[in-house]
Amino acid sequence: MNTTLSYPANSQITQEDLEFLSTTFPKSVRHQLITLRGILSNRKAPWRTYSNGVVSIMKEHMLAEVALNCSSNIADRVSMLVEKGVCLQAVSTNPLKIPMSGHELISLKA
């Protein structure tokens, strides 16, 4: 069974989502977050559709692609984001500042 996740195309990421993203993707795997954003924003992906201002993602197919292009560990982290209710569309489209070192959390670019 394939679960379909639906998000408004113009979704905005919340501060709470950014904080959860920062803990789910610690500095050691943040480079994978950049790859993940590319996967999620791929408009030609067969598991991603757009209609009437809504982006729909076939969860299991997307997770399979994440596991293939990143790792199964990163796919597990994406599952955690989905369980927490983080909008994957917002993760893929909002301009994020993703620090790779130091103590700064992931934030929106100013």
Image (spheres, rainbow, N blue to C red):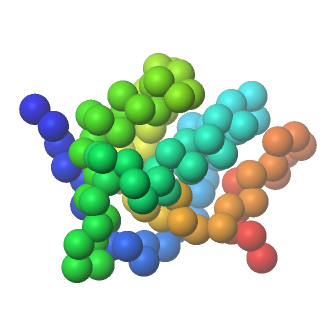
- Residue at image coords 23%, 72%: 51
- Camera-side residue of 105 and 109: 109
Q: Is residue 3 visible?
A: yes
Horizontal arrangement in the rendering, residue 85 relative to residue 31 (left or right): left
Q: Is residue 88 visible?
A: no
- Residue at image coords 44%, 38%: 78
Q: Position of residue 50 (x, y in %)?
A: 29, 67
Dividing the picture into quadrants, the one containing residue 110 is bottom right
Q: Position of residue 97 (x, y in %)?
A: 75, 60
- Camera-side residue of 109 and 70: 70
Please tell me whether residue 25 is drawn above or below residue 69 in the rendered image: below
For the image, the number of numbered tags is: 0
Seen as rendered, the residue at the extreme right is 102
Seen as rendered, the residue at the extreme top is 72
Seen as rendered, the residue at the extreme left is 1
Q: Position of residue 68 (x, y in %)?
A: 47, 24
- Camera-side residue of 94 and 20: 94
- Residue at image coords 70%, 54%: 106
- Residue at image coords 53%, 22%: 71
Seen as rendered, the residue at the extreme front is 44
Please tell me whether residue 49 is drawn above or below residue 64 in the rendered image: below
Horizontal arrangement in the rendering, residue 90 relative to residue 53 (left or right): right
The quadrant of the rendering that contains the N terminus is top left
- Camera-side residue of 94 and 16: 94
Please tell me whether residue 34 is drawn above or below residue 63 in the rendered image: below
Q: Position of residue 41 (x, y in %)?
A: 49, 56
